[in-house]
Structure formats: structure tokens, C-alpha cells
Image: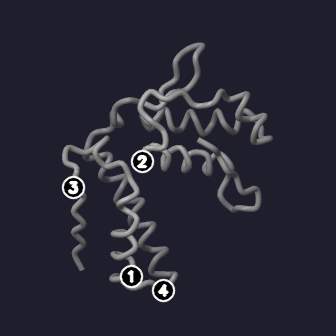
Amino acid sequence: MKFLLDAGSRVPIYEQLVRQVREGVARGDLQDDERLPSVRSLARELVINPNTILRAFNELERDGLLISRHGLGYFVASKPSDLTKTARRKRLLETLDSWLTEAVHFGFSSDEVQEMVRQRVVGFKWSAFSKTKETPLEVSA
């Protein structure tokens, strides 16, 4: 996976890395047990401080998305997060509320937002973490 950073963004570099790894896993670009580049090599490639990468990888490990193997590096976790379903649902709803707030401020209608979600949902690897392969979209108004 190729990481792309935007130094001019308001989003901190470590958070850009976190988002890219999360999306890579969700889209299936990063597979279970796949090894990520070493902190040092990635720091050299991206020309950033290794502590920035370590911060991102540690956050992803705390969230259960990555696992570290002593002397081997960081790998994509082969199982969903250890967080309870209730905790995962709460975190997702918080993120969704934030996203919907942005959509409202950008002037999108409910129908436009639902259509955007329908279009984007097909690009993600749902079966890896869910029990069913279907992705019903039920949005109550």
C-alpha cells in the first residue's frame, strides 16, 4: 500500500496515516496478517519523523486493527477489534454523527447523502468483519 500525505492539510500527519490504514483494511487493500512497512523505512520514504508513524501504528494497535510482533513489525490483525459490539456501535455512531453534521453544513440533502453512501458502500470489504455479505442501507428520516 502506498501512503500519501498532505503536508498542507489541517489533519495531523499521524491521523492521515491512521485513516489510510483503516481505509486500506476496509477496502481490502491490506489483507489479514499482511505486514506493514517498518517504521524506519516508512519514515525515510515519507520523510517524516519515525515517532509520527509509531504514534499512528500504536493507535491502530490499541483499536485492534494492527498487531505488533516483537522483532517483526506491525501486521494487520486477522480478527475484528476486541471491543464489544456495543462499544464499536457507539464509536461508529459518534463518527457518523460527525460526518452527518459536516454534510448538513455543506448543504447536502438527506437524499443526496443516502445516495453517496449507496455509491460508496460497494467499494468496501464487508464480509471480512460482518456475518452477512449483504449491506442493507436503512436510514430512518
Name which of mark 2 and mark 1 comes first in the sequence.
2
Task: Check disc 4 and give the amino acid type.
Answer: Gly
Q: How many marks?
A: 4
Task: Check disc 1 and give the amino acid type.
Answer: Glu
The local secondary structure at tag 4 comes to: loop
Q: Position of residue 72 (x, y in %)?
A: 58, 17
Nearer to us: label 1 or label 4: 1
Name which of mark 2 and mark 3 comes first in the sequence.
2
Relative depth, front residue between 5 and 84: 5
Per the model, the C-alpha gap separating discs 2 and 3 is 15 Å
Q: Residue at x 45, y 66 (%)?
A: 98
Quadrant that contains the C terminus: bottom left
Which quadrant would residue 115 be assigned to in this image? Answer: bottom left
Find out whether the residues at labels 3 and 1 contact each other: C-beta distance under 8 Å. no
Kindly identify which residue carries mark 4.
107
The local secondary structure at tag 2 comes to: helix
Kindly identify which residue carries mark 2.
26
Kindly identify which residue carries mark 3.
134
In the rendered image of this protein, does residue 66 appear above or below residue 27?
Answer: above
Mark drawn on residue 112 = 1
Name which of mark 4 and mark 3 comes first in the sequence.
4
Q: Position of residue 49 (x, y in %)?
A: 77, 37
Mark drawn on residue 33 = none
Q: Position of residue 59 (x, y in %)?
A: 54, 38
Per the model, the C-alpha gap separating discs 4 and 3 is 30 Å
Q: Residue at x 38, y 82 (%)?
A: 112
Q: Residue at x 47, y 32 (%)?
A: 76
